[in-house]
Image (spheres, helix red, strand yellow):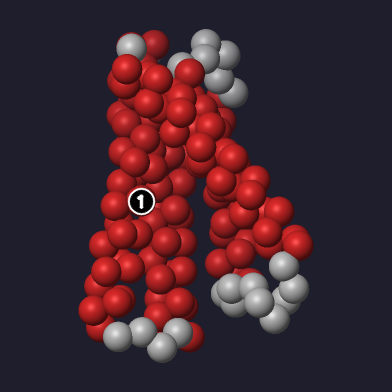
Amino acid sequence: MKANFFWKMFFWITSIGIMFDLYSQLSISDELQYQSPIYLSLINILIIPILIYGLYLFAYSPKNIPLFFKNKVVWNITLFFVLSSAILSLYFEFITGNYLPQEMIFISIISFLVFLPYGYVLINLSKKIKRTSKCTH
């Protein structure tokens, strides 16, 4: 019960955080915004809704899931792109910023710790889909 409550809260905190991020991107002038390549923004636009839906599936375990999301490849690809996006974001932040090596290590460790729950959810969704697909055949 407590674990399920944690993931529900994690889903809502992530959803609210993403909404706040979208609002701040729309309301902050271009000069003050974080600059990243357009392809990284496109990856995030495509992958974040799938990640949020994955968090929802993991937290609430609904009965009716669209067929597209019952494929473990979807969750493996999502994991790959979320991880790639995180690594590329760090890379572009480090090459445009003026960071000391100790700061880069600290930021990378914190980013990894923030990524862990998302990776856990996506890996477990992939395993869960794999188990349920074996049971239905």
What residue do we see at 59% from left, 69% from top? Answer: 39
Residue 126 at least partly seen: no
> Which amino acid type is marked by label 1?
Val
Q: Is residue 45 left or right of residue 104?
A: right
- The residue lying toward the viewer, choosing from 35 and 50, is 35
Q: Pick the quarter of the image with the N terminus.
A: top left
Q: Nearer the viewer, residue 94 or 106?
A: 106
In this rendering, the answer to whether 45 lies above or below 3 is below
Q: Is residue 132 above or below residue 115?
A: above
| Residue 135 appears in view | yes
Quadrant in which the C terminus appears: top left
At x 29%, y 52%, the residue is 113
Rendering quarter of residue 109: bottom left
Instruction: Provide residue 74's location: percent of width, then percent of height.
Output: 47, 39
Total marks in image: 1
**How many neighbours does mark 1 have within 10 angstroms: few (below 14), some (14-19), or many (20 or more)?**
few
User: What residue sits right under mark 1 in the picture?
Assistant: 114
Nearest the viewer among 20 and 37 is 20
Instruction: Please state the horizontal and vertical placement of residue 101, each as a whole percent of the image.
Output: 25, 83
In this rendering, would 137 be left or right of 14?
Answer: left
Q: Secondary structure at mark 1?
A: helix
Where is residue 115 shown, x and y percent of the image?
Answer: 35, 51
